[in-house]
Image (spheres, grey):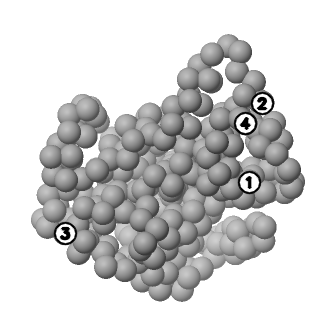
Amino acid sequence: MTIDITKSVKELVAKGIKIPPQPAVLIELRELLARDDANVRALARVITQDPGISAMLFRAARSPVFGRGKKFAAIEEVIMTVGVKQTFNLVQAMALTCSVSDRARKAYDTFWTRSQEIAELAAIIAKDRVSICNVFPDQAYMAGIFHECGVPILMQRFPDYCQTLQLKNTCCWPTLAEEDARYQVDHCSVGYIVARHWALPDFVCAAIRYHHEIPRDEIGAACALVAIIQLAGYFYHRLNHVDDPLWPTLRSDVLKELGLNADGEQEYFEEISEQFLSRQ
């Protein structure tokens, strides 16, 4: 999918839709990583400039998926255990939750809690299926956070887009067709533009763009990542006793993409949910 991001951002701005700029901490980190003399102490110093991101990074790093269950006293320890590239991917995901929010509205907090839990489930699934899918936990976590980031952006622009977001009704926002009809834009397209604007890997951007389907025109990691996100979302719905309206149509393709047997779906759900519920 070829798209002029600068033009697309301008078109959204003309509609009153604000695309969040990359936080200074990300820009500084990316510039630092591009230099040959980047070191753990310098990277940690940049990350700790943002207390919110630092706190979320510590939380994620405590998970066995990333930090092997260790307890960390400093960001330097996180970087050395998790790895520089993986830490940067996690920071990107966490920076988004701080950039697209409205602390005066509970719906945003509920939405980001949902996104973070789906991201954690996606990371667990990715770790388990990495030999088949070649998608790593930090990449799945980042995609899980970003995959529906168009929702809160459209909430900011259109007050009637979704009056409340509650765990008991996680699918209250409009369908893609309804979005196009009512707002002439959909959250998948907005999320894709945000991901490209933030310079996420191409296959992650593609997965965000097509996360409501298994994209036939995409191959390899993008398809696998969509399947991971869909399975994580389905497991999230099951954990919260809510039906997932997309799952019946995507189930066969998702399980096939991840190399899972349909007869073992219940057993796999129990395995992943057990890890998720005992992650901290």
Q: Nearer the viewer, mark 1 or mark 3?
A: 1
- In the rendered structure, the answer to whether residue 61 lies left or right of residue 73 reads left
The residue under label 1 is 58
Q: Give the number of the mark in front: 4 or 1.
A: 4
Label 4 crowd bin: few (<14), some (14–19), many (20+), radius 10 Å: some
Real-space CA distance between mark 2 and mark 1, rounded to the nearest whole angstrom: 16 Å
Q: Amino acid at mark 2?
A: Arg
Tag of residue 44: 4
**Earlier-in-chain disc, 1 versus 3:** 1
Q: Nearer the viewer, residue 33 or 83?
A: 33
Q: Residue at x 82, y 45 (%)?
A: 74
Considering the image in quadrants, where does the N terminus appear? top left
Q: Pick whichever of labels 3 and 2 is earlier in the sequence.
A: 2
Mark 3 to mark 2: distance in Å? 49 Å
Q: Label 2: few (<14), some or many (≥20) within 10 Å?
A: few
Q: Which residue is mark 2?
A: 41
The residue shown at (21%, 47%) is 12
Q: Earlier in the sequence, mark 2 or mark 1?
A: 2
Relative to 3, residue 130 above or below: below
Ranked by sequence position, the earlier of labels 4 and 1 is 4
Residue 260 x, y percent position in the rendering: 60, 60
The disc label shown at residue 173, or none: none
Q: Residue at x 20, y 39 (%)?
A: 10
How far apart marks 3 and 4 lie (CA) works out to: 44 Å
Report whether residue 203 is seen.
no
Label 1: which secondary element: helix
